[in-house]
Image: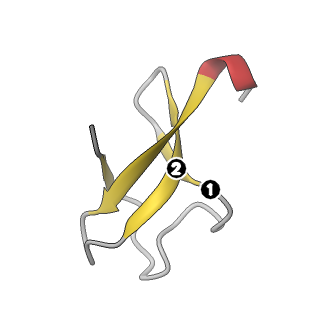
């Protein structure tokens, strides 16, 4: 993933509600920054905050 294909955002974990900094990609994929790809609760499903 190149820098041109992603942007920083905030997202809420759908399982526990924690707010995380994430990278969002043009295809809709969301990846938490610095947490190994998941929320500390183990979830990998997020809602990007606008």
Q: Residues within 10 Å of mark 1 (few under 14, many from 20)?
A: some
Mark closer to the chain start, 2 or 1: 2
Q: Which residue is mark 1?
A: 33
Q: Which residue is mark 2?
A: 22
**Left or right relative to 2: residue 37:** left
Q: Residue at x 49, y 80 (%)?
A: 40
List x then y, in percent, for residue 24: 49, 35
Residue at image position (59%, 27%) is 6
Q: Is residue 36 left or right of residue 19?
A: right
Q: How many marks?
A: 2
Q: In front: 36, or 11?
A: 11
Is 34 positioned to the left or the right of 16 in the image? right
Give the vertical position of 13 relative to 22 (above or below).
Answer: below
In the picture, which quadrant includes the N terminus? top right
CA gap between label 2 and label 1 equals: 5 Å
Position of 12 compared to 29: left or right?
left
- Using the image as rendered, state which of residue 8 and residue 32 is in the foreground: 8
Residues tagged 2 and 1 counted as in contact (Cβ below 8 A): yes
Q: Residue at x 34, y 73 (%)?
A: 18
């Amino acid at each position: 993933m190149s820098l041109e294909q992603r942007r920083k955002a905030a997202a809420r974990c759908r399982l526990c509600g924690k707010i995380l900094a994430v990278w969002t990609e043009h295809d809709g994929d969301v990846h938490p920054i610095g947490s190994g790809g998941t929320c500390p609760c183990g979830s990998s499903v997020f809602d990007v905050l606008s």
